Image (cartoon, rainbow, N blue to C red):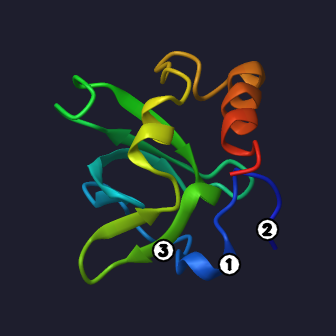
């Protein structure tokens, strides 16, 4: 079952047992970084991606629905958004990402805005 941005699409190939730590993350137009953190909790699934030097060490939080495919053999997560779309996303807030519904709504609104 898929509902909203906080669940993986059934076609992504993700299972709740997947440990995505350290996986490379590929936007639709190239690499954006590595998985620094993640949640497999149904209804609250996401990736935190460390973009390294690409956007000056910034981290981004990607709701699970942005993931188009998980390639466990190559340890790569493919997302359906472009680098520029991800770069323009709301700032990752380490303190608010776990327990602030308003922050989740802001991110969900951005990534659920008709991509």
- The relative height of residue 24 versus residue 38 in the rendered view (above or below) is below
**x, y percentage for residue 76?**
31, 68
Callout 2 secondary element: loop
Kindly identify which residue carries mark 3. 69
Residue 51: x and y, percent? 28, 37
The kind of secondary structure element at disc 3 is strand
Q: Position of residue 11 (x, y in %)?
A: 62, 81
The residue lying toward the viewer, choosing from 40 and 107, is 107
**On the picture, is 27 further left or further right than 102?**
left
Q: Quadrant of residue 8?
A: bottom right
**Marks 1 and 2, how far apart at CA:** 7 Å
Q: Quadrant of residue 29?
A: bottom left
Q: CA distance from mark 2 to mark 3?
A: 15 Å
Q: Which marked residue is nearer to the observer: mark 2 or mark 3?
A: 3
Could you say which disc has been placed on residue 10 in the image?
1
83 relative position to 104: left or right: left
- Mark 2 burial class by Cα count in 10 Å: few <14, some 14-19, many 20+: few
* Tag 2 residue: 2
């Amino acid at each position: 079952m898929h509902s909203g941005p906080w669940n993986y699409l059934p076609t992504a190939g993700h299972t709740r047992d997947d440990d995505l730590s350290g996986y490379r993350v590929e936007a639709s137009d190239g690499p954006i970084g590595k998985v620094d953190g993640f949640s497999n909790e149904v209804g609250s699934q996401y990736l935190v991606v460390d973009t390294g030097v690409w956007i000056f060490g910034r981290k981004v939080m990607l709701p699970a629905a942005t993931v188009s495919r998980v390639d466990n053999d190559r340890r790569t997560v493919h997302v359906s958004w472009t680098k520029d779309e991800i770069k323009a996303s709301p700032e990752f807030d380490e303190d608010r990402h776990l327990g602030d519904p308003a922050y989740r709504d802001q991110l969900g609104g951005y990534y659920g805005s008709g991509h």
